[in-house]
Amino acid sequence: MARKPPTKPRKNASQERSRATVDALVEATARILVKEGFEKASTNRIAEIAGVSVGSLYQYFPSKEALVAAVIDRHNEEIMGIVRSARIEVADMPIDKAVRKLVTVAIEAHRIDPKLHRVLAEQIPRTGQLKDVEAFNREVHALVRTYLESRRNEMRKIDPALATFICVSAIEAVAHNTVLNHAEMLTEKTVRTLVDETTRMVVGYLR
């Protein structure tokens, strides 16, 4: 059985110069993944694109899998930044407006570099990042359930856990499939229509 490559960074970048090196390496990895694919993302190639030596790369990352894991972490943090901001905004909104906001946010989050998002989705099992993705999903579910619990008087009688699962699954499926499979055809008008129709579907289910 082949040994699994290490995916944890060797050390954290604490100084400005070292942070710049790490950022350059992570950015170079993302660019190569999108343009050339995982198989061609060798540490030599990543170092070349980043403009640093291979020795400098290995000071921070033990393998290319660790670099891909760092790209996944950065991408997930960008997405969660949007989601966490939405949590504050929807807290006092009625259901129809809150659902519209959540649908809009889901599509916006998936539109953060959709080509990279597609590649990273394929690499998550390889890099051992499933636990982080699961933690991300739990946070999203907790956000939605907390909101639905606070609006039970506006909903039909339904188990909040089930309602949360169905709402999150429906919104995620629309956002994921739309952006990853049809990103090049997405106009602002199309996005507005998708938001309208998905909002109507979810609100109709809740009420």
Image: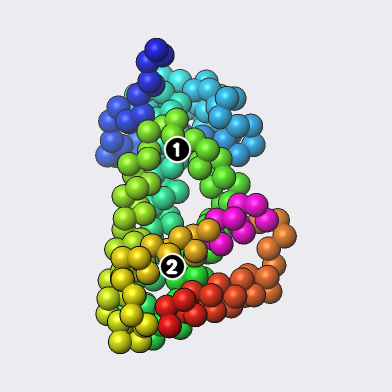
Separation of marks 1 and 2 at Cα, in angstroms: 24 Å
Quadrant placement of the C terminus: bottom left
Q: Secondary structure at mark 1?
A: helix
Q: Which residue is mark 1?
A: 124
Q: Nearer the viewer, residue 21 or 95?
A: 95
Where residue 96 appears, as percent x and y from the top left, is 46, 83
Q: Secondary structure at mark 2?
A: helix
Which quadrant of the structure image shows residue 193? bottom right
Q: Is residue 174 left or right of residue 161?
A: right
39 over 131 or under it: above or below: above
Where residue 163 appears, as percent x and y from the top left, is 37, 69
Scheme by which the image is coloured: rainbow
Q: Residue at x 49, y 64 (%)?
A: 170
Q: Amino acid at mark 2?
A: Cys
Q: Which residue is mark 2?
A: 167
Q: Residue at x 53, y 75 (%)?
A: 201
Q: Is residue 127 left or right of residue 196?
A: left
Q: Which mark is residue 161?
A: none
Which quadrant of the structure image shows residue 184? bottom right
